[in-house]
Amino acid sequence: QKEVEQDPGPLSVPEGAIVSLNCTYSNSAFQYFMWYRQYSRKGPELLMYTYSSGNKEDGRFTAQVDKSSKYISLFIRDSQPSDSATYLCAIKFNNDMRFGAGTRLTVKP
Amino acid sequence: GAGVSQSPSNKVTEKGKDVELRCDPISGHTALYWYRQSLGQGLEFLIYFQGNSAPDKSGLPSDRFSAERTGGSVSTLTIQRTQQEDSAVYLCASSLGTGDGNIQYFGAGTRLSVL
């Protein structure tokens, strides 16, 4: 079993839709949670990070962590074509960082 | 200043040749990481450097892979006797330090193709 499981998609939605991206992890030692966005032929860029269970909101993006279920989510409201990218979840404990395989998202105008 | 810089952006090589990939981290960042990203796969950790400490080489897939970091700044990842399965995007990241709160910032990567 991988440390982090993420559905690779691809996921295609119409502009304006609410997008839900999810990951599960197996080791409760990981305490820091991140979402990275990666455009084609670019490096991953940090989108959101959180430490605690619950929701963290930043504009159209909401990161949700449920430590009891070892489940993390990223919600994108009012999705735009510019949101089309691969989204990678990541979990971290000290220097140990693990990434999901990434979900490829396409938002169609 | 500028972000993490990697060169070359693309590298095509023949099987059996050696390649060197370069990473210039964000100024002041003491930690530097190398990852490999294959199609449809997550980022695979290769090696990380923290200050003057011995590097963590636990992710290097074979002894054909090595990396060094000179003067605590620029790093070079070397792959000897390249194989076709080495074809991937090699990403470098840097962070201010280590520990939970230190975020890694990535370069654009080097796309390596081994023919």
Image: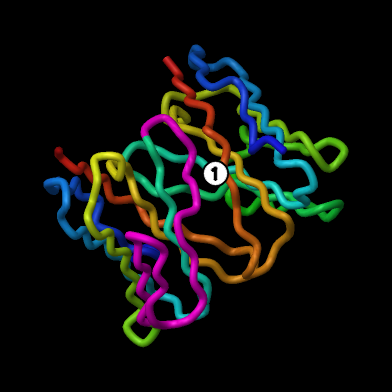
In the rendered image, residue A65 lying in the magenta stretch gets the answer yes
- Placement of B86 over or under A3, stated as above or below: above
| Spot occupied by residue B54 in the image (x, y as percentages of width and height) | 81, 53
Query: Is B57 placed left or right of A11 in the picture?
Result: right
| Spot occupied by residue A38 in the image (x, y as percentages of width and height) | 40, 42
Residue matched to label 1: B35
Q: Mark 1 is on which residue type?
A: Tyr
Local crowd size for mark 1, using a 10 Å CA cut-off: few (<14), some (14–19), many (≥20): many
Q: Quadrant of the C terminus of chain B?
A: top left
Q: Which residue is depicted at the point 52% across and 79% down?
A: A29
| Spot occupied by residue B70 in the image (x, y as percentages of width and height) | 83, 36
Q: Depth check: give the residue in front, A80 or A53.
A: A80
Magenta residues span A40-66
Q: How is the image coloured?
A: rainbow
User: Chain under label 1?
Assistant: B
Q: Which residue is depicted at the point 83% across and 43% down?
A: B72
- Placement of A25 over or under A12, stated as above or below: below
Quadrant of the rendered image containing residue B7: top right
Q: Depth check: give the residue in front, B28 or B17.
A: B28
- Placement of B73 over or under B83, stated as above or below: below
Q: Which residue is depicted at the point 61% across and 45% down?
A: B93
Q: Which residue is depicted at the point 50% across and 53% down?
A: A46
Q: Depth check: give the residue in front, B29 or B62.
A: B29
Query: Is A16 placed left or right of B106 in the picture?
Result: left
Q: Is disc 1 placed on a helix, strand or loop?
A: strand
- Placement of A20 over or under B6, stated as above or below: below
Give the dominant element type of the magenta stretch: helix, strand or loop: strand
In the rendered image, residue A55 lying in the magenta stretch gets the answer yes
Q: Quadrant of the N terminus of chain B?
A: top right
